[in-house]
Amino acid sequence: MDKTYESKKYEKNIYLSWEKNNFFKPKSNENNDFFSIILPPPNVTGALHLGHAAMIAIEDIIVRFKRMNSFETLWLPGTDHAAIATQNVVEKKLKLENKKIKDLTRDEFIKECYKWTEEYHDKIVSQIKVMGGSLDWSRERFTMDEHSSKAVYEFFERMYNDGLIYKGARMVNWCPRCMSTLSDDEVEHKNIKGNFYYIKYKIKDSEDFLEIATTRPETMFGDTAIAVSPKDDRYKDFIGKTAILPILGRELKIIADEYVSLDIGTGALKITPAHDPNDYEIGKKHNLEFINIFDKNGNLNENAGRDFKGMQREEAREKIIKLLEKNGDLLKTEKMEHSVGTCYRCSSLVEPSISEQWFVDVNKKIKNRENKSLKELMKEAVENKEIEIIPKRFEKNYFMWIDNLKDWCISRQIIWGHRLPVYYCLDCGEIIVSQEKVKECKSCKSKNIKQDKDTLDTWFSSALWPFSTMGWPDNDRGLDFEKFFPNTLLETGYDILFFWVARMILASKYLFGFSPFKKVYLHGLVCDKNSKKMSKSKGNGIDPINMVEKYGADAVRMSLISGTTPGNNINLYEEKIEGYRNFINKLWNIFRFIYDFENIFSDVKINEMDKLENTYDIENIESLADKWIITRLNNVISQVTKKINNYKFGEASDILYDFVWKDFASWYIEIYKLDNYLNNKELLRYVTVNILKLLHPFSPFITENLWQNIFNNYLISSSWPSLNKNIYKESEKDFNILKNIISSIRNTKNQIKINKKLNILFLENKDINTIKDNLEIIKSLSGLEKIEFIKSIPENINDYIKVVSSNFVMFLEIGFSDIEKIKKEREKEIKIIKNSIKNIENKLNNKNFILKAPEEIINKEKEKYNYLNEKLNKILN
RNA sequence: GGGUGUUUAGCUCAGUUGGUUUAGAGCGCCUCGUUUACACCGAGGAGGUCAGGGGUUCGACUCCCUUAACACCCACCA
């Protein structure tokens, strides 16, 4: 074995061997215990980022753990076509080649998208493998493959037939860069610094004017009214009159509407019904004209007048302000911060516009679902505990989102995606929804038919992922649907709770009447050391594959798991990864010692494997250290199992880290090395084997590697460690006494800066056998030459220094009197003990404490009190 | 405007249902160390009024209220 572990040498081959031996496929068991989880399909737009890496680490831990606990376990992989996101990156690529999307036919562009997705699909899959993700690749899916598409069309058709999908003209969010609508969730609101412009709107045939405040003067070309509050005395007389729109000179009605508040702006509001959701409502109510002033690119159109037609929004704003100023119609400008909607894919300013789109009605009652609406179905899934969200606080978020939910706009004006299964008869206007290509109008028999050009929201298809991957609706997956749906668990980042999780619940509750999974575990986002979200634009991102190259997949995985908690962000930085690389190397060296130097497995016969793997006969253990390590191991097995079952992966990982490095390496193995120690090979083997098993979900590569140095089977398919029933409960206490004594002696030697071996005198007491039985351990680990036992403190003790630890008093022979050097240290210790004694005294003197605290606690305090007093005495006298 | 989270050692974070001698870890820092598993190491150490203020309790890092700072989510406020 090499002196340091070189992950690169082994990881790839280990993964290949797992895959080749079909360990990732569900393995049936007698109990019919199933566990299923789907991989949140990564977008095929780019490479794997740390968020993906964290997701794979977490899911892989769970899946390996379940497998080892003999669940029939399915972890199903796939990728997402990521409609707008992919179209954007492909467009960018075309731009580099000096091509525009318009230069290509629809089919040509789709071909380009496929080219892109294939390339990145391969990249992503290989990267997931690099991370060690043990997914069943034989079941891999793509959201736009044949079966998944079939599911999408089936879903659409059923919803349409139930009247849940409709087409209508509504105000929607328009991204002028993506040239498409966005759903409400796809708009990110950002606060920006802008100006509040106060503009004079003159009253027709009068000297009067109204003062209007707006942040977006360029929308004034779309104004068709001015509204004031009916309660506003200031503007009472203006209601019913006509105002003149500056620049264009168009006439505007002045109307009264409850919506207008008195204390915002000037209390007079310009109404732009075609470009503001509120104005839209007011416009409908008052029968106002809807004037669309923007084209698809977000530039002004002919309705803005000849001077402004074709201008960009920002450009037009400046020009308008200048013009108003010149005409004396700009009264003042104030700086203000306000929120604007931006596209979540390209960050462009979203323009609210009216257009004909397809929507999912979330409020319509559904006959087959007890007359509940989609909204109600989604709500009840969590309310009735069909689904448990971990951590629980996100349930509140979920409910809040549902309460604010409006009809879901699902049509997109982009090319890449599932095309709407909607056909129009150009002769009679009939709308036909069909999964098959329609060639003839069913009402007028015309052959003049055209399919809708729009595609579906990418989340419309990912909503079906938990079951479209299991063979719904065309049953191409055998028993999968029956066995693995609903999924046992859904694991994903909290940032897509609404986009994805909620939509999956919607789809499943609608189609089947039940939830798509039983539990939802949400992890946090990966941030840098300053808690800033990693992103390309900030340049603070760490490439996980790069880190794997440098430190190994196991180290990267552990750095993403250790010290993290459910739902909270994960701060990652290279030093942290380095720390876990060191741990992996430590593990390697522990085994190097055990294999290369101690050779404890050399005499193991094949038929003894079972014993090594599972239970160990603990009846005849003699030495304290052996009793202690097996007791510790037992506790660790119990704790780690519990933590994983409760989704506390960070804590589970920390427990193992401590156990391996401190208890096992620094204490047990150091003791094992001693010449006179009664080496218990069998026990060492047992502990070793169990450590590999416990660590396997967290660091699968090195553990598998080390396992195969001993066994000719695979760790990945071994069973999770079982608990020993009878353990040596007392051993922990006794061993801690040893540890304390050793530490105290080491500490004292350090204080007086002596490195050579010293003699020591032990004052005998009732527990002295603990010392006598473990003489060699104390001697070696604390660097002693000779240990002697004394019944009382000798007269001439000048060459010695007193050491007090647990209830033992020792005298370390330093050959000279050097009390001064450590006097300070001793004083400090005394002070701390005295303080503690005082605290306990206060407690014990408190009548209420004696009266109300449980007896157990009181006794503990009393014990503590006695112990500390005794110790203090020993130090002082 | 509504909601959620965070605030613990110089830095990054753990801390299970309130009671574990002196509140933990890693990194960093200091002092030692060429003991043949490991310097990606070993031994030891310094460093904390657990954000501030109230309250509940015999007892609060932990539960309740409140203040502050920061982060995030949601909301149509001109």
Image: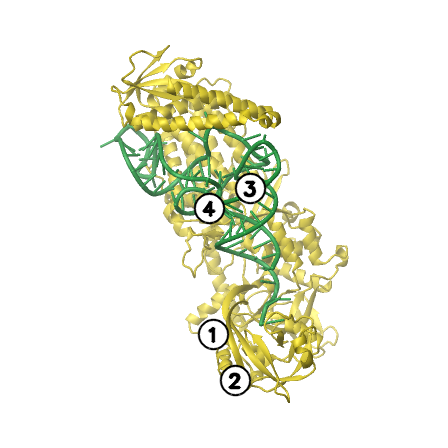
Chain colours: A yellow, B green
Looking at numbered disc 2 in the image, what kind of residue is underneath it?
A: Gly
For the residues labelled 3 and 1, the Cα–Cα distance comes to: 49 Å
User: In the figure, is residue A747 to the left or right of A530?
Assistant: left
Figure quadrant of residue A258? bottom right
For the residues labelled 3 and 4, the Cα–Cα distance comes to: 14 Å
Is there any visible trace of residue A426 in the rendered image? no
Tag 3–tag 1 contact (CB < 8 Å):
no
Chain under disc 2: A
Chain under disc 3: A
Q: Residues within 10 Å of mark 3 (few under 14, many from 20)?
A: some
Residue tagged by mark 1?
A: A100
Looking at numbered disc 3 in the image, what kind of residue is underneath it?
A: Tyr
Q: Residues within 10 Å of mark 4 (few under 14, many from 20)?
A: many
Callout in the foreground (2, 4) = 2
Is there any visible trace of residue A316 in the rendered image? yes
Residue tagged by mark 3?
A: A647
Nearer-the-camera pick, A777 or A606: A777
- Asked which secondary structure carries label 3, the reply is loop
Where does residue A100 sit, x and y in percent of width and height? 47, 74
